Amino acid sequence: MSDTDDAEQELGVTKSKEYETGEWYAEVVRKAGLANYAPEGMSGFIVTRPRAYELWERMQGFLDAKFKETGVRNAYFPMFIPESYLEREKDIVEGFDPEVAWVTHAGHDELEERLAVRPTSESIITPYIARWVRSHRDLPLRVNQWCSVVRWEATETKPFFRTKEFLWQEGHTAHATHEDAWEETMLRLDQYESTYEDFLAVPVLRGRKPDHDKFPGADTTTTVEALMPDGKSVQGGTSHHLGTSFAEAFGITYSDEAEEETLAHTTSWGLSWRALGALIMTHSDDQGLVLPPTVAPEQVVVVPIWQEDTRDEVLEYAEGVAEELREAGVRVELDDRDTRNPGFKFNEHELHGVPVRFEIGPHEVEDREVTVVHRPDGEQSTVAREGIADAAQVHLDEVFAKLYAAAEENLEGGVRDADDRAGILGTIGQHGGYVRAPWCGEEACEGEIKEQIAAEIVMVPFEDEDDLVDADHDETCAICGEAAERTAYFAKSY
Amino acid sequence: MSDTDDAEQELGVTKSKEYETGEWYAEVVRKAGLANYAPEGMSGFIVTRPRAYELWERMQGFLDAKFKETGVRNAYFPMFIPESYLEREKDIVEGFDPEVAWVTHAGHDELEERLAVRPTSESIITPYIARWVRSHRDLPLRVNQWCSVVRWEATETKPFFRTKEFLWQEGHTAHATHEDAWEETMLRLDQYESTYEDFLAVPVLRGRKPDHDKFPGADTTTTVEALMPDGKSVQGGTSHHLGTSFAEAFGITYSDEAEEETLAHTTSWGLSWRALGALIMTHSDDQGLVLPPTVAPEQVVVVPIWQEDTRDEVLEYAEGVAEELREAGVRVELDDRDTRNPGFKFNEHELHGVPVRFEIGPHEVEDREVTVVHRPDGEQSTVAREGIADAAQVHLDEVFAKLYAAAEENLEGGVRDADDRAGILGTIGQHGGYVRAPWCGEEACEGEIKEQIAAEIVMVPFEDEDDLVDADHDETCAICGEAAERTAYFAKSY
């Protein structure tokens, strides 16, 4: 490990996660070497440092493998979209126009037509899908790209949660039928759920966005939502059934088996580096970053503790342990720097979120053991040197399980019910988290809550999943008292 | 395999590689499903389809692993650079200003300062390196990013060779001494050479660019150059020793062991998707794409050939063969479509560049054999079913060796010597390729050649590698007759 990240580093985190969540988050991001803010003139942009980019690469690897197993192929489309293309789907232009960065000049010349820096790529990808699809045999057609997009929002910057440029993937597919497109929409939502739960140890809820909060042009926008420790919800990834609106705007038709020209049905789905924000925010603590072993760049750090007279035997033993772990496929780092004392090293690796620490001193050598310490709870135990690689895996799994359990407890405890306006306002005001309430389906009712406490409907559960409102019963909307159509989850959100 | 790519596909390539290289190249790119041109208003941009993007991903995997083994960490920097930052290194702004795409508006507002879409990122990365480096212990510092950049050149578009936006990686490093930076420069050049030679089967020459053709602000620009079959050179990747010019412009200093504030020495190095252009151009032929097995998405295609009465046994046998290859780690596709006849399949897989074809009919089943056909030379042989995975690997290695040998023969036969102006002009005019000639070091002499036949000095060999001009001898410049300082390689180039 290089000292590269140390330059700006004071090891201690000074802010409290519980009482100053925003400042604490910013401090962890900076001190753990994850990101810096961009220079003046570019507020809203960040520099993603290697410690954060490694997290992105690992998550990308996990999700990209799932995509490839299920028929998705990566491609790359131009980063600019001609204004006339953006205007072809009216909801898209209305939805994104206020946030578009425009290229107007190239070299010393003004362009004839302005080019949008992509805020999302439906308007440049769909016309090509239209060229590539001729027959029902060309369907389904699935492409995905990993890239960055730009949305010029005027809100406060929060690394990975709110930035004007962000890394993401965007998948775009075309299908023969509405049902096929719906299956695709849900398959990608499942994969996002799995990325959060199985890889990032962040449990999520899933459902639809209310109609008034759908992706521009979409029939249905589905979402996974994660609850942060401060009681706010994060929209973790969205998968859109676009119906035929983009197919109509850009002319995706295919000749079906009866050789009739038929409109295709399309989907798009995206997951951004906001997942890293949720990861960092969920698990980390007042000592710094906490990472599940799945995504951690180093899973185990071996810290040898020696005096002058025990140095050689301790180092040799520690090297053997590290080597055995490495051969077993564990991502291990041996921290044998002699410029730093063990206490400094412990603090530094805690700050960086290494899930498991092996401490090795003369006692461990003598007893043929290793002292194992878990991040974040400091649980300490002793394991035998014999079979150390298997033991390491057991401890890594334990750390993952602990992190998941804590996040799950937060989520489960964070869902409460209410059946009137005062209940919604009071519960969110007092506890944060989600409030489930029957809802008539009207945006106006959400508006009343939003106006008072800046909470909104982040999700409506799927019909077959956890919906309180039964069509046969006669619940009434918690806000207006009219007949309730759906259960809504109200929450403040990032 | 889906029929996705077939929509625009007629299988036959109609142009001749030998006689109409440019048109042939464009046709292969289109018909093999590699790329499309971008829409009106965006001439110079391309859409990179999955078949090409897979090549990029594989090459990226090869090179990225080398980077990571040698201390490089990936990061991500903003895609925009404030104009004032671009202006801080004067050579950069002079070199790139005519080609920069400018963002001037965001949403409905004009920006206070224009933002350049990155043409290269020294001007945004170096200030952060300056923040991260404090002490000699922070050095060397190495970051790399995989991204796209935009250079608004007004030349004719040629997919992967000349496009206004292109994918690349750019590495940026800082070092304590000039020598350390030179070692880094050469290490990255070695890795580019290996990527071409060991992965893409494209042999290259290596050397420096003449001083008047260096990267803006660089002390030395090194290059690998590949010779295309039409006699033109491709600059395959460049690695720059930037001396202290960027460290001065952006203030990278470190306290050395004596605690003196000292300027760092920096490098940058980039390889773009031009490597894919060189790959396609070098190996492909009048039947379509040809790929070495290293980079081919499918290494072996198994084509079962059946009649109604032999269908089951042939298919079962073919599935067993494909499965055995897959288990051995060979990228194999079983083409069992019954909507296409074997002849169509052969043509299609040839167009797509699958290196090895296995043909399996009733005879092969009966004799427990497989018929093996190489791309591109059609060499056919029979191998036993027993041990088929090992046999496949042998054939894949043979195909790689054949492709490399052919490209090497082209390169070796393409280097000729001349010692006067007429010799340079005549040799390049007649044969293309490289002409080695003693050169005084003055740009004016290159200018005389450039003016007449649009050839330039693409490379000057390193002192210890293949330099004809010996300091103790008295060669004279082939153009002006003054004392020669160096050997120059003249060629036309992409």
Image (spheres, coloured by chain):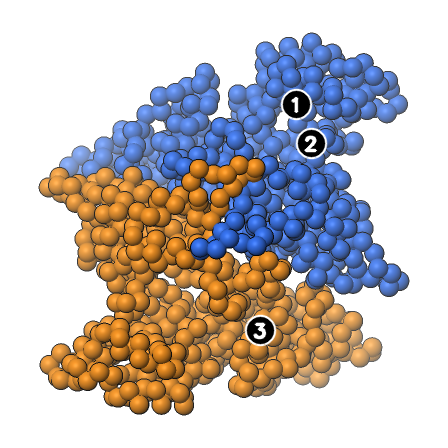
Chain colours: A orange, B blue
Q: Do the residues under discs 2 and 1 have CB atoms within 8 angstroms?
A: yes
Q: Position of residue B279 (x, y in %)?
A: 50, 33
In the picture of the structure, the residue carrying the numbered disc 3 is: A26
Question: Vertically, is A248 above or below B215?
Answer: below
Location of residue B391 by image quarter: top left
Location of residue B346 by image quarter: top left
Q: How many numbered marks appear?
A: 3
Name the kind of residue labelled 3 in the image.
Ala
Q: Position of residue B235 (x, y in %)?
A: 60, 32
In the picture of the structure, the residue carrying the numbered disc 1 is: B456
| Along the viewing direction, whichever of B277 and B385 lies nearer the viewer | B277
Residue found at x 26% / y 73%: A443
| Along the viewing direction, whichever of A362 and A34 lies nearer the viewer | A34
- Answer left or right for A45 relative to B4: right
Residue depth check, mark 1 versus mark 3: number of the one nearer the observer = 3
Question: Vertically, is A22 above or below B383?
Answer: below
| Along the viewing direction, whichever of A314 and A20 lies nearer the viewer | A20
Residue found at x 20% / y 42%: A254
Q: Chain of mark 1?
A: B
- Answer left or right for A309 relative to A147: right
Name the kind of residue labelled 1 in the image.
Glu
**Mark 1 or mark 2, which is nearer the start of the sequence?**
2
